[in-house]
Amino acid sequence: MAKTGMDLLKKEVLEPGLCVACGGCVGLCPHISFFDGKVICTDSCDLDDGRCYSVCPIAHQTEKTSIDKEPVGKCISIYRSRAKDNRLREKSQYGGTVSALIIAALEEGLIDEAILTSNGNGTSPRGVIAKTAAEVIECSGSRYTSSAALEAFNKRIKEGSPRLGVVALPCQALSLALAKDSQKNSDQEIPEAELTVGLFCTWALKYRPFKGFLNKEDVTESLLRYDIPPPPAEVFQVFTGHKTREYPLTEIREFVQTGCAFCADLTAEFTDISVGVVEGMPDWNTLIVRKKKGKDLVDRAVAGGVLELEELPGENQDHLFEASLLKRKRGKENWDKKKQT
Amino acid sequence: MHTVALDTPGEAHLLIGNEAIARGALEAGLDFSAAYPGNPSSEIMETLAAVAKDLKFYAEWSVNEKVALESAAAASFAGLRAMTAMKQNGVNVVSDFMTNLTLTGVKRGLVLVTCDDPGGISSTNEEDARLYARIADIPLMEPSSPQEALEMTRFAFELSEEIGALCIIRSTSRISHSRGRVVFGQFSERGRRPHVDTSVSMNTFPVLPKHKAALGKLDKAQEIFEESPFNAYTGPDAPELMVITCGTGYLYVQEALALLDLNKRVGVSKIGTTWPLPDKWVQERLKQSEKILIIEEVQPFLEDNVKSIYAQHVSSIGLKTFYGKASGHIPRIGELNPDVIMQALASILEIDVSLRDEGYAEKAKKVVDELVPPRELGFCPGCPHRASYWSIKNALKWDDRDGFVSGDIGCYTMGIWPTGFNQVNSVHAMGSGVGMSSGYGKLDQQGLEQPIISVVGDSTFFHAGLPPLVNAIYNQSSFLLIILDNSATAMTGFQPHPGTGINATGDVATTVDIESVCRSMGTDVTVLDPYDLEDSSKTIYSLLQQSDGVRVIIMRRKCALVQRREGGFPYEMDVKEEACMGENCGCNRYCTRVFRCPGLIWDTKAKKTRIDPVICVGCGVCSDVCPEGAIIRKEVSHG
């Protein structure tokens, strides 16, 4: 039988530099760690089979994604949404929907704790646990660099398995889905997340070279968030407390995780809800409600007056579908190309 | 008081060769001794230092071998009998001074003892230091037993004074460490008052006349050696085969001849004065037989020199056939043993010799495999080096730029093996890791992108780590120097060094503070506790990210063996069995398979880790290694 352990993970994913640092394999064992923005094997576990390989979204990318024929995956409804609270919107990316939903989930008691990505000022962003609205707000804003946030999920599960909500990038959502699949044939299960909120993602940056770039550019003040305004701007914006800086997108693309090229999922399909941008409406988010659990949360958030919902204009939905299908196609093509070489 | 200090001439005692050498020096009236430890030589100075106060002579652990010989030479220049001792590598270190000292000569008896390690059992190399006697034009003697070690050492002082030159005694591991019956001689006068005669200049100029004079001294030594009782022939007048041997070879030959009952057929010329060879005496021995077998360890030193005499006098000696290393009868590497010599004798004399029963080797291997658990060379339980390498490993892995470690000599050399997580890439001479890093650290200009770490022990730092560090700082090389400070010269037996605040005779000494030394040269110094794995790993990582010049980390923790003697450790370790994940995904014996402290045992039946209470010292480090918190520390009080 083929060996599907850490050695294979190293061979297929880590050594070729394809790891996108989702963190799915981090925190499960002492051999793999996330340090300074990078997933590293410090030792070899020597086991033939391991959870690290079975939850790796890069290793299982093509098996799992694009099965769904729907353009953005399973979907109950699509809206545009935003947090009612202005202050939440100011600090957040676009409409502040994710922060509003997570706060609602915590306050409504749907989850005990949320796994979010820290701001990581001065250090690499990483997975953290949030239990209060203030802790959620602390994590709002975009990161754009890999954070291995699932490390926090794995560690928290190991400590005692509370009901966890996870804000996940597509790769992280896929990893969680793979973990669920792998439970069937393992006695050491990774329990499911109670709630998954997905983030749209086109790619993430490698932390170390990006940090090196910012250091070189003398960006030393605290970083709030990043953004890429819609085409044809072709710029990457860095928001700090003092000012906004813009860099040509081509310069930044050099730091994109190699593995992101193989990702076929734009909208984080393996989640309860997905949230992203609405092109041309920086105050709003696109909200995809995928599962009943997600619908319940959205309903409660609206009823509780923390979330505003409107219909997503047809033009925006068309754009979204187009972009989603394009990413699937590109991801698949890149895989096929890679397999041939 | 140590046996060697007993004023009991005629009494016999059991001494190891190194103690006998020390006794020989004491009988010669030793006034001054200096050495740097190194196996198999260390017991010489240890023995001397133990009795120095009682017998009122000076003994010191020097910072390195060169300084030791220089100090001893100074004592000789001031009219005292002086000695230094070292291992073969030490002779390399002293060679520069030694080859100059040849030209100045000595005033009072000055003796250098080199204890070579054939087979490199506890050395980084296999080397024959005898060749230095030729290079430096100084006399050399090789004892074959502890008794002879005593007598030769005593005589070496007389010879040194008679010809006015440094003399070398060359021992090997088996002579230095074998215990044998030694009959004591008399102590001679001690307590000379030193005075430096400033009317005589002790320099090497003019070089040629002084070189000529040195050769004259060697000629004089040769004359003396012609009559030396250290050279002896035993056997028939005209043996079928003449064995010429020295040192350990003599003992092995005697055993081999007895076992093969060849004493009536084979003659044995045992030579104690191996440089310069007693020319005429050797010629006479060569004439006795048609076949000559030369037996010695490591280099064909005796063999080549005997052949040189033969070539010079072949017309009077007649045609001979030589056997030895050149003919392939005697191995050119490793230690000798009676088996090797029996095989050589059997082959030359065309006799049948079956050394062992058929299948013996296989049977023996089987028994050994069954009874002896496999063991690799490893750090002791609680060793701070294991913890240091753990953090170095983590930091280099996290860094992920294929960084590497240059090391050198000490217990921490074992960083090349799994016990040190195979972290050390290169090992050569004392201080070489720092020197190599100084070079690696300049290659960034040509595009080297790998981070560089150098590890050096505290004793090695003082021995030979300072000049390369100065070089690196001066030349703006860039690397991370990690000084593994276990506050002892642990590998050779805990001898004190300049950083320990104690001298060879146990008195309080000035402590040379490594930290201040480094800071004074303008480097940043960070002191870490190797037992704090997280802090150490992260600090090493963060210093690896800098690329501006030499950065110094001192990882400071007493050698675990010293700590154990000085009050022990604070913990008693235990394993919470239910928490131990054993071989499961998520661990797979992280502690016993990766961390590998011998205090941790893998229970193959229960599939759980256990603590070996006999050897666990209670340092507590493994508790931080276990991912499940299954290894727990319990505070213990030391009454």
Image (cartoon, coloured by chain):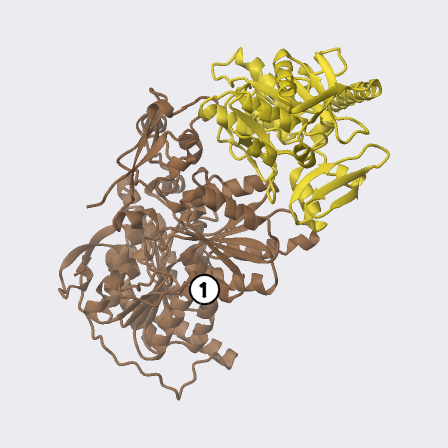
Please name whichever residue, A3 or B122, is drawn nearer the observer in this view of the structure. Answer: A3
Q: Is residue B566 visible?
A: yes
Q: Which chain is brown?
A: B
Q: What is the secondary structure assignment of the residue under circle 1?
A: helix
Which residue is painted at 49% across and 67% down in the image? B520
In this picture, is A102 found above or below A177?
below
Q: Residues within 10 Å of mark 1 (few under 14, many from 20)?
A: few
In this picture, is A275 found above or below B452?
above
Q: Could you say where residue A174 lies in the image, as x and y percent from the top left?
A: 64, 20
In this picture, is A234 found above or below B282?
above
Please name whichever residue, A83 or B481, is drawn nearer the observer in this view of the structure. Answer: A83
Q: Which chain is yellow?
A: A
Q: Residue furthest right?
A: A232
Please name whichever residue, B348 or B619, is drawn nearer the observer in this view of the structure. Answer: B619
Which quarter of the rendered picture does the N terminus of chain B lie within? Answer: bottom left
Q: Is residue B328 visible?
A: no
Which picture quadrant has residue B34? bottom left
Q: Which residue in the protein does label 1 denote?
A: B516
Which residue is painted at 45% across and 23% down in the image? A160
Q: Could you say where residue B381 lies in the image, as x and y percent from the top left?
A: 34, 40
Residue A270 located left or right of residue B138: right
Q: Could you say where residue A324 lies in the image, as x and y percent from the top left?
A: 77, 20
Q: Amino acid at mark 1?
A: Ser
